[in-house]
Image (cartoon, rainbow, N blue to C red):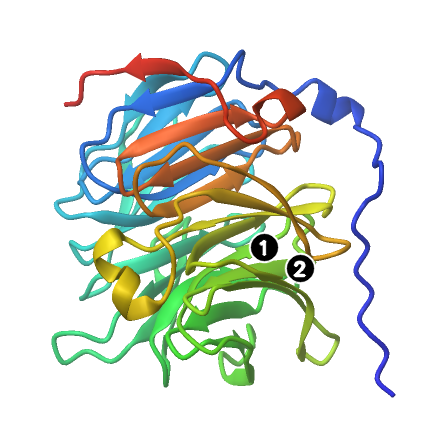
Amino acid sequence: MVEEPSYKPASGAQITKEQREMVEPEENWRLRYHQRPITDLKFNADGDLLFTSCKGETPVVWRVSAGEKIGAYKGHTGAVFSLDIDKDSRRLITGSADQKGILWDVETGKIVIAYDNLVTTKSVAFSRDGRSVVMGTDAIMNHPPRIWIYDTRTGDLVKKHTTETVPTSVNFTLEEDVIYADTTGSVNIVEGRTFSLSHTKKIHQSKIVSLTPSFCHTYFVTGSNDFKSKVFSEGPNREISVIREFLSDSPINTARVSPDNSMVACGGGTDARDVTTTGGKGNFNIEMFDCATSRLVGYYSMHFGTVNAVDIHPSGRTLASGAEDGIVNLINLDDSSFLNAPFTSMDIASE
C-alpha cells in the first residue's frame, strides 16, 4: 500500500513576528483603474505592494495600505496576460500578446530587458533566486508551443524547449526544475539540468488554467475547467502526487494556498452566455476551502464577472481578486466580511 504523501495544514498556527509587522490594507478597497478584464495580480514578498495586469497594455502597482495606484509600466503594445515579482521586489516580469516578455525595474518603471518570444507570451515566472525567468508561449502562427528560460542579468536565452502540449501556466519547482500545466489537464516537469521532460501526469479532465506554488514552494495548487482545484507535490524522483482536491460548481480559473497551508482560495465562474454549454453556474464568487477537510467553508461575492486572478497576502489575513469586470478587490479576511464584504470605492482616472 502506498503511503499518502504528508501534507500538514496548520491548525491554529501562530502568527510570526514578521507577519504581524507586514503592511496590510487599512480597510477593504475596491480598486478601479483598469478598463479591461483583469488577467493577473500578485502581492510582493513584503506585502506592501500589489501588481495587477489586464487585457490592456499597462500593468500597474498599488500601495496596499491605502489602496492607491502609485505607478504604471508602459512599454507593451498588447494585452498583458501574466506577471511575477522577484523576492526582493526589484524586478517585475510581464508576458504579453505583443510577443514579448519584459523585465522592469520596479522602482523606476523602466524597461531593463525586452525578450522576444515570437508569439503571444501567456505565462511568466521568476526562479527563486531571481536569476532566471521562465515563459510559456502558445502554438500559433506556425510556431509550436514552447517554454523559454532567460538570464535576467544578461538577457541571454538559456534554453528553449518545444512542448508536446500547449503550456497554460509555468513556474519553477523547489529544485529549480521547470513545471508547467497544459490544455489537456496534465502537469509536466522538465528537468532543469538536461531540459528534458522527466515526468508528466494527467490530474484534471480538462484544461488547467492556473498553476501556483504554495508560499513554502513545497506544494502547487491548480485551477481547472473541470470545476476542480488540486494540491499536489513533487516527490524525490519528480513524481507528481495529488494530496487534496476541491470541487466547485463552476470552472476554476485561479487558486492560491494560504501561507499556513490551512485554506485554499479559488475563483472562476461561468459567463451567462456559456452556462448552457458548459453546465456551470454563473458563479463569480471567491470560494474558501478548508485544506484539512477539502470542504467549502464560505465565500466572498463582490465581482460582476468571471474571476480570473486571486492572491493571498503574505500575512495570510488579506485577499486580492480581479475579474472580467475590470475591478480589483482588496479584502481583509475576517469573520465580519466573510460572506458579503463592505468596500470603500477608489475611483482612479485611467490613463
Q: Residue at x 18, y 32 (%)?
A: 35
Residue 291 is at least partly visible in this image: yes
Estimate the x, y position of residue 46 in percent, counting from the top left.
58, 28
- Tell me which corner region of the image, top left, top right, bottom left or bottom right, holds residue 292: bottom right
Task: Please give left or right for residue 235 compared with residue 135 in the image.
Answer: right
In the rendered image of this protein, does residue 278 appear above or below residue 21? below
Estimate the x, y position of residue 307 in percent, counting from the top left.
38, 45
Question: Gap in Å between the C-alphas at discs 1 and 2?
Answer: 6 Å
Q: Amino acid at mark 2?
A: Tyr
- Tell me which corner region of the image, top left, top right, bottom left or bottom right, holds residue 221: bottom right
Which residue is disc 2 drawn over? 219
Q: How many marks?
A: 2
Estimate the x, y position of residue 18 in percent, counting from the top left.
73, 25
Neighbours of disc 1 within 10 Å: few (<14), some (14-19), many (20+): many
Q: Secondary structure at mark 2?
A: strand
In the rendered image of this protein, does residue 85 appear above or below residue 15? below
**Front-lying residue, 82 or 33:** 33
- Tell me which corner region of the image, top left, top right, bottom left or bottom right, holds residue 192: bottom right
Q: Amino acid at mark 1?
A: Pro
For marks 1 and 2, the one nearer the N-term is 1
In the rendered image of this protein, does residue 179 appear above or below residue 273? below
Estimate the x, y position of residue 81 in percent, counting from the top left.
29, 51
**Front-lying residue, 50 or 155:** 50
Which residue is disc 1 drawn over? 213
Task: Please give left or right for residue 245 compared with residue 52 in the image.
Answer: right
